[in-house]
Image (cartoon, rainbow, N blue to C red):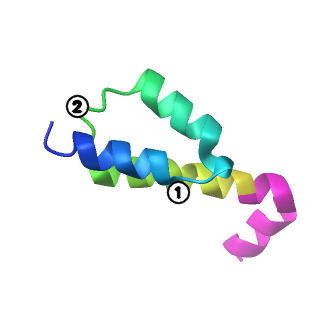
Amino acid sequence: MIYFLVINKILQSLTLHFKDEVASIKELKDLNEMSIDELQGSLIAHEYHLILKKFGVAFEKKLQS
């Protein structure tokens, strides 16, 4: 409940890249119980997925080496 307003403001301020992720966070997670760290982790994971989709598996292999 403490972070509810902050999390809503963050979700509203995101670009269209995160449109689908914002929708799924709002539907699947309880925003009253969510922490800012949890939100950040979800958004970073989504951004990582977008990068992998754009550059393919070769990029991931390069990161691992």
> What span is colored magenta in the figure?
51-65
x and y, in percent, of residue 46 in the image: 60, 49
Magenta highlight on residue 5:
no
What's the mark number on residue 32? Answer: 2
The N terminus lies in which quarter of the figure? top left
Q: Is residue 1 left or right of residue 43?
A: left
Label 2 SS: loop
Query: What amino acid is at disc 2?
Result: Asn
Main SS of the magenta part reads: helix
Magenta highlight on residue 56:
yes
Is 42 placed above or below 59 here? above
Would you name the residue on which mark 1 appears? 44
Q: How far is mark 2 from mark 1, CA to CA?
A: 20 Å
Q: Residue at x 29, y 52 (%)?
A: 36
Query: What amino acid is at disc 1?
Result: Ile
x and y, in percent, of residue 43 in the image: 51, 51
Q: Is residue 56 visible?
A: no
